[in-house]
Structure formats: C-alpha cells, structure tokens
Image (cartoon, rainbow, N blue to C red):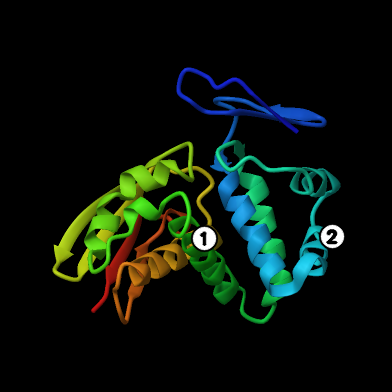
Amino acid sequence: MASRPRGDNGWAVVTWDGGMLTQGTGSRIKGGVLISRLNMLRQHGGQAGVDAVLRRLPAEDQALLRQMLLPVGWYPLELNLRLDAAIAGVMSPEDKDRAFLEMGRASAHEALHGPQHVFVKAGEPHFLLSQAPKIYRFYYAVGSRTYEQTGPCAAVLRTFGAENVTEPDCLTIIGWHERAIELCGGRAVHVTHPMCRARGAPHCEYHCTWE
C-alpha cells in the first residue's frame, strides 16, 4: 500500500493491491479508526487475537489490514463495518452490542490521548462536544454533525447526510462520546440514541447527559 499526493481538498489517495480508493469513490473512513480497532485487539489478545478476527474477513480485507495503515488516509467504510462485525463475533458473541460500545470507547481513549488531545479540557465536556463538527471530519468523508447545548450537563449531537448508517456503527459513536465525556471529567455519563437513520429517521440524534 502507498500514499499518493493529496487532492485539492486534502484527502489522501490510498492504494493497495487490486484497487485504489480515490476521492469521491464510495463511503470512506479514516485509517485511524482501523488502527484503533487493531490496537484494541492486540491489547486484549495479542497478535493471536488479531489473527482470529482477520480470519473471519475476506482475503482482500485481510491483505489490506495486514499492511501498514495510514492514520490520515481514507479507506472504505464497508471495510470498517466488516472488521467491527468480526471483532464483535470474536470478543463478545453473546452481547455484540457491548462489543461495539467498547470499540467506540477504545477509539476515543486512543484518539483523545493522542492527536485529538487538544479537544480535552478538564471539567469542560461541552468544549469537546462543541467541536463535534470538526471531530466528525477526522473520521468520515461524507455528512456532518451538529452540537446543541441543552443544559449545564446535557447536549444533543445530530448527524446529517452520513452514508451506510448502521446500528452497530451508531453504537460505536455512543461509546466514543461516553468515553470522551468521561475524559473531560464528566461522571455518570449517559448517551441515548432516540433517532437513527438505520431505523428510518431522517437523521441520527445522540442525547448526552452527565454529572
């Protein structure tokens, strides 16, 4: 796999054997998400845990995920969805919803202790949540997210125009924001998802509360 020069909008063009992901071709997600998933697997089960999950994926997915991934490169969103499903099937076959939530939490923990640490301010969950439109662009190429403060310890995030919306992916988003709010000092964090495009709603809503 190799990285080619960026386009006018700054998106990296990522190539691999048998194909090329370019600007404007299908739903995309940043490589950092895939990396965080693989890192979580290594922390829980070492390389054997990674191998157990990858064996559940098509050969082309395995080949790509075994190569060096670019954190800021764009990869097919469908690849991430297949990887998440495989992880849930291995790590928590009896409670896959919990597995998806934990994937989101692990992703937030890694990102917010790394390149996205600037969004964390002690005692200020609203600051991080207010950056939702910017943070969204770190992960997805299509769609947008808005933030509305609804109380001293409450906010609503709304996602519009996302592609390939699935309930498992929405669970990872819930987990991400639960952990993000905790890292900003929030306690008893609760994130609900009353509206979901995967269930026929016009957009997704995430209602966040904490103490």
According to the picture, the residue beneath numbered tag 1 turns out to be 110
Where residue 55 is drawn, which disc sits there? 2
Q: Amino acid at mark 1?
A: Glu
Q: Is residue 20 left or right of residue 190?
A: right
Foreground: 163 or 119? 119
Inter-mark Cα distance, 2 to 1: 25 Å
The answer to whether 64 is drawn above or below residue 57 in the figure is above
SS at mark 2 in the image = loop
The answer to whether 116 is drawn above or below residue 53 in the figure is above
Foreground: 70 or 58? 70
Q: Amino acid at mark 2?
A: Arg
Question: Quick one: label 2, few (<14), some, or many (20+) residues within 10 Å?
Answer: few
Quadrant location of the N terminus in the rendered image: top right
Q: Residue 67: name its quadrant.
A: top right
Q: Is residue 9 left or right of residue 146?
A: right
Quadrant location of the C terminus in the rendered image: bottom left
